[in-house]
Image (cartoon, coloured by chain):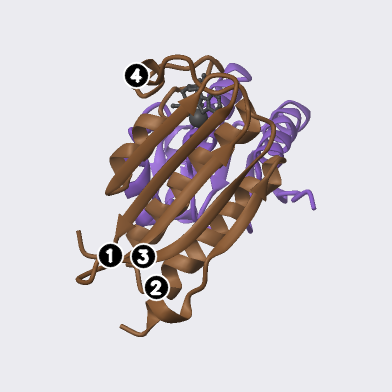
Chain colours: A brown, B purple
Amino acid sequence: MKAAETVTAQQQSVQHDGDVVLARQMGRQMAMALGFSKPDQALIATAISELARNIVNYASHGTVDAQPVSDGRDTGLHVVVSDRGPGIDDIEAAMTDGFSTGRSLGLGLPGTKRIVDEFDIQSTPGKGVTVTIIKWKHR
Amino acid sequence: MAVRVPILRQGSHLIASIQEELSDSDILNLQSRILDEVVKRQADGVIIDVGALDVIDSFGTRTLAEIASAVQLRGAKMVIVGIQPEVALSMVLLGLTLETVPTMLDLDAGIAELNGAAR
Ligand SMILES: Nc1ncnc2c1ncn2[C@@H]1O[C@H](COP(=O)(O)OP(=O)(O)OP(=O)(O)O)[C@@H](O)[C@H]1O
Ligand SMILES: [Mg+2]
C-alpha cells in the first residue's frame, strides 16, 4: 500500500462545537485516504466526534492529532485527543456506560473504547485529559 | 458558519431535510425551529431526513430522541428516514439506540408510516 506514505499527520484545534465537525471530517478524510472501509471511516469519525465534544463540554479547548501508523503488517490511524482542562478524578467511573456529570448519556468514552482497536486514557486532575486511540485497517 | 436546515410543508406534515454535517448548535437550532413549526402549522407529522449525515453520535442521538418526544407532546408523530447503514452500525456499536423513534429507509416509507399512523 502506497497510501500510508502519502497521508501526512494533521491537527485540528478544538474549542467551539463547529471544531468537532472539522475534527471528525479530518479523521474521516484521512481514513478514506488510507483505504479504510466505509464502516471503519464512520467509526473513526464517530470516535473523534465523541472525544472532541468532551473537550468542548468539559475542558474548553484542546487538540486532535491524527497520523498514519504501521506495525509492519497493517496500517492504522493513530489519534491523540488532548486538553489541559480540569481532568477526570475517577477514570474508572468515567469509563462506565451511563456515567455522566453532564446529564448526558454517558456513552462517549466507553462507546469510543468499543469502536476502536486500541484505547488509552490518561488524566491528571487539574491538568487535563489525553486519550489515544488506534484503529487498524485489518482487525 | 451556522447551517439552517430547510423545513418544508407537505400537507399536514413537515419535512426537515438535512443537507450537510451539522454542529451541535445547528442541531439545537433545528430542534427549536421544528417545535415552533409544529405548533404554528398544526402539523400532525414530522419527518427528519438524516441521509446526509456521516456521523450520528451520542449528542445527535440524544437530541433526535428529544425532538421526537417534544413533537409527540405537541400531538404529532415523528419519523427519521435515511440513516446510512454505516452510521446505523456505528450507533449500535457505540451503544446508542433510537428505539423511541420509528426509523424508515427513505422519505416515501416515512410518509407512508405517518399516513398509516394517522387516525
Ligand atoms: N476531556 C474531559 N475533561 C474532563 N472531564 C471529562 C472529559 N471527558 C469526559 N469527562 C468526564 O467523563 C464523563 C464521561 O464522559 P462520556 O463522554 O463517557 O459521557 P458524557 O460526555 O457525560 O455523555 P455523552 O458523551 O454520552 O454525551 C463526563 O461526564 C465527564 O465528567
Ligand atoms: Mg461525552
Residue type at the position of mark 4: Glu
User: Marks 1 and 4, Cα distance to the nearest angstrom?
Assistant: 28 Å
The kind of secondary structure element at disc 4 is helix
Q: Which residue is mark 3?
A: A69
User: Marks 2 and 3, Cα distance to the nearest angstrom?
Assistant: 10 Å
Contact, mark 1 vs mark 2 (Cβ under 8 Å): yes
**Residue drawn 53% across the image and 50% down it:** B50
What percent of the width, then of the height, locates residue B79?
48, 38
What percent of the width, then of the height, locates residue A126?
60, 20
Residue A137's label in the rendered image is: 1
Label 2: how many Cα within 10 Å (few below 14, some 14–19, many 20+): many
The kind of secondary structure element at disc 2 is loop
Contact, mark 1 vs mark 4 (Cβ under 8 Å): no
First along the sequence among labels 3 and 4: 3
Q: Are marks 4 and 2 on the same chain?
A: yes
Chain bearing tag 4 is A
User: Marks 4 and 2, Cα distance to the nearest angstrom?
Assistant: 33 Å
Q: Which residue is mark 2?
A: A34
Q: Nearer the viewer, mark 3 or mark 1?
A: 3
**Residue drawn 68% across the image and 37% down it:** A61
Label 3: how many Cα within 10 Å (few below 14, some 14–19, many 20+): some
| B90 w.r.t. A87: above or below | below
Residue type at the position of mark 2: Leu
Camera-nearest residue between A107 and B39: A107
Q: Are marks 1 and 2 on the same chain?
A: yes
Answer with left or right where residue A49 lies relative to residue B93: right
What percent of the width, then of the height, locates residue A105?
45, 22
First along the sequence among labels 4 and 2: 2
Q: Nearer the viewer, mark 2 or mark 3?
A: 3
- The quadrant in which residue A58 appears is top right
Answer with left or right where residue A72 lies relative to residue A27: left
Q: Nearer the viewer, mark 4 or mark 2?
A: 4
